[in-house]
Amino acid sequence: MRLCVDLLVVKINPTDEIQRKPWFYLLMLMVFSIVTYLDRVNITVAAKYIMPEYGFDKVQMGTIFSALVFGYALFQIPGGWLGDRLGARKVLTIAVIWWSVFTALTAIAGNIVLTSLMGALLSFFVIRFLIGIGEGIAVPTYNRVIANWMAPTQRAFASSFVLSGMGIGGAITPPLIAWVMIKFGWRISFYLCALIGIVVGAIWYRYSSDKPVTEAADVEPPRSNTVPWKAILSDSNVWLLILSQIFAGYVASMFTYWFFLYLTDKRGRGFSLLEGSFYAMGPFVAAAIMPPFGGTLCDRLVRRYGKRFGRRSTALGFLSLTAILVLVGDRASNPYVAIFLLSLGAGLVFSAITSYWATVVDIAKQFSGTVTGITVMGANIGGMIAPTLTPLIERKFGWTAAFDFAAICALVAGSIWLLIRPEREIVVATFRRG
């Protein structure tokens, strides 16, 4: 109710009124996250039509899928740096328009001039890579927005809006895109996704601001265009966050890429394709619902016990529960109990990530965008390993072994938090002394 009042009751000057509302920024972060996932996943549905039209096999289509991941991973750090230097208003506007344009071009990737120069496969690869650049620039900038607009005891909750957006995007994209493709053709779905992105970018540019609110005054604008790279890269917290996110990213990526196939595989749960597509929404629904509760718990613990206990206990607790639920869920004889427990485990991974994002702002302050880009690289590394390693483990040892390995990764990711010190602002302190 408060969100609706904040956004709709606008008097005197609508733009100025909205700019002062942190709730507007949280809602927009969620919308950006949904659009990001929409444009990331749409091609996995369209592949059914693209492959026969251009004669691509599964390996070639997989190469096209990976193109976005490469661009996304490579531009995390530049994206965070741009968000800190130029401000989230400009950077997010440019980023969403950038990837929306190339999303539209995906519809004609096999027919444009690039095809005559390099062939259809490479043309699709280049365009998807360029989409990844835009999305890679946007994601760390989200944390710059959180740094500007949310107080220290609200940051984990704020980051949950980004994570919930990913869950919502993952849940709605397959049925939405499939319906559009059936009714209007696969190319129209890309044009529609592009239009949605451009509209979101226009709303963001019109109503957003880079001026922080009073409650977030501990995050000052950068005093110099020079990023203290030495201080950042020598900070043990940064490297521990990267390492922990490698393992957490592996678990999240396994659910993203392999849960549906686990459900429909005869060696897994043996559901039909239709049933599997429905139940495969479980992890995404959990990821949409659970992070706000996880973020709220984290912030409450911070208010009561301080940053070290609050951030550590939330991440360690959620990731440990993930490991338990994955171990028990895969071994459940009832397939519906298994789906519930495994989906709950996936939701807890995304809930734990609220601690990662909040801790980056805690330690990096005015360079939170840059440091977010650096640390999220860890999640991308894990995310690139899981799609390949999971089937290799399953082929040799079975699905139980694959999930056991994911459970071990969750435990390792959580245990690393025992060494992380969110209260130590090394980056900011070093910068100020310089």
Image (cartoon, rainbow, N blue to C red):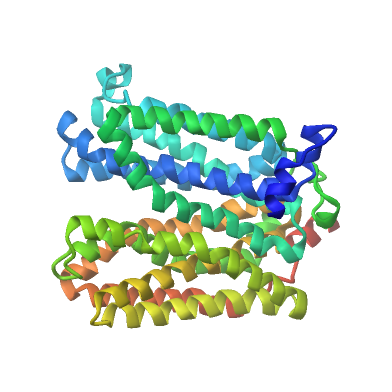
Q: Is residue 118 above or below residue 28?
A: above
Q: Residue at x 62, y 63 (%)?
A: 238
User: How far across and how far down the image is residue 115, in percent?
Assistant: 27, 21
User: How far across and how far down the image is residue 103, in percent?
Assistant: 41, 31
User: How far across and how far down the image is residue 272, in percent?
Assistant: 17, 60
Q: Quadrant of residue 179?
A: top left
Q: Quadrant of residue 259?
A: bottom left
Count of residue discs: 0
Q: Is residue 282 above or below residue 193?
A: below
Q: Residue at x 44, y 46 (%)?
A: 37
Give left or right: position of 390 versus 4: left
Give left or right: position of 174 versus 313: left
Tell me if I can see residue 141 in this picture.
no
Give left or right: position of 79 versus 329: right
> 98 and 176: which one is in front?
176
Q: Residue at x 55, y 43 (%)?
A: 32
> 24 and 426: which one is in front?
24
Q: Is residue 364 above or below residue 69?
A: below
> 273 and 162: which one is in front?
273
Q: Quadrant of residue 267?
A: bottom left
Q: Quadrant of the N terminus?
A: bottom right
Q: Quadrant of the C terminus?
A: bottom right
User: How far across and how far down the image is residue 27, in percent?
Assistant: 63, 48
Q: Is residue 57 above or below residue 254?
A: above
Q: Residue at x 41, y 63 (%)?
A: 252
Tell me if I can see residue 345 in this picture.
yes
